[in-house]
Image (cartoon, rainbow, N blue to C red):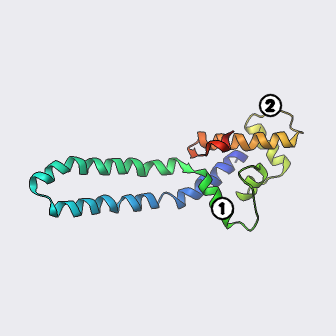
Amino acid sequence: MSVFGSIMSAVFSKPAAAQAPPPPAASGPAPAQTKGSSAPSATPSQTTASSPAAAAAPAATTGASTAPPSSIDVAAVLTGLAAQSNEKLDWRRSIVDLMKLLKIDSSLSARKQLAQELHYSGDMNDSATLNVWLHKQVMIKLAENGGKVPEELKH
């Protein structure tokens, strides 16, 4: 697997397990409770008038519940992992710390391989410039692949 593929897998597999179940659980019972509570107190004419709205609500909820798995909150996932880590890792600014947080090889050779995957055209021996570029590109690529990444991390 590519280095970036490992990063993607590490970021997207964690929230898929952590974030996907809560939205359906939170949105699933809510429409059922709304329907159940409004149906007994509504008159027949109100019930038919509210039926289109009731039908529209689950459709809107279904659309919302399918969005979170494809739009993972990258910052939330990484912040959660950082909170569980024994090390203090500055994943918001450091590609090395980001890779360590995800338990991916953060050696210079691994970062050079990542740079090649992401088409870095600068000097591979200028590790400071390389690292800054890599961090920005990883955040951009995570966003391009369905992650929600704060704007400040893409600049």
Task: Tell me where residue 138 appears, x and y as whole percent.
Answer: 69, 43
Q: Which residue is mark 1?
A: 81
Q: Residue 2, can we see it?
A: no
2 and 1 marks in contact (CB < 8 Å): no
* Amino acid residing under circle 2: Ser
Where is residue 71 drawn, in percent x and y?
A: 52, 47
- For the point 60% across and 51% down, which residue is it? 74
Q: Residue furthest front?
A: 152
Residue extending farthest top: 121
The amino acid type of the residue labelled 1 equals Leu
**From this viewpoint, is residue 5 visible?**
yes
- SS category of the residue bearing label 2: loop
**Quick one: label 2 or label 1, which is nearer the N terminus?**
1
Residue ID for mark 2: 121
- Circle 2 Cα neighbour tier, 10 Å, few/some/many (<14 / 14–19 / ≥20): few
Residue 51 is situated, as x and y percent measured from the top left of the image, at 19, 50
In the displayed structure, would residue 21 be above or below residue 116? Answer: below
Secondary structure at numbered mark 1? helix
Quadrant where the C terminus sits is top right
Q: Nearer the viewer, residue 105 or 39?
A: 39
The one of 90 and 107 positioned closer to us in this rendering = 90
Question: Is residue 14 rendered to the left or right of residue 138?
Answer: left
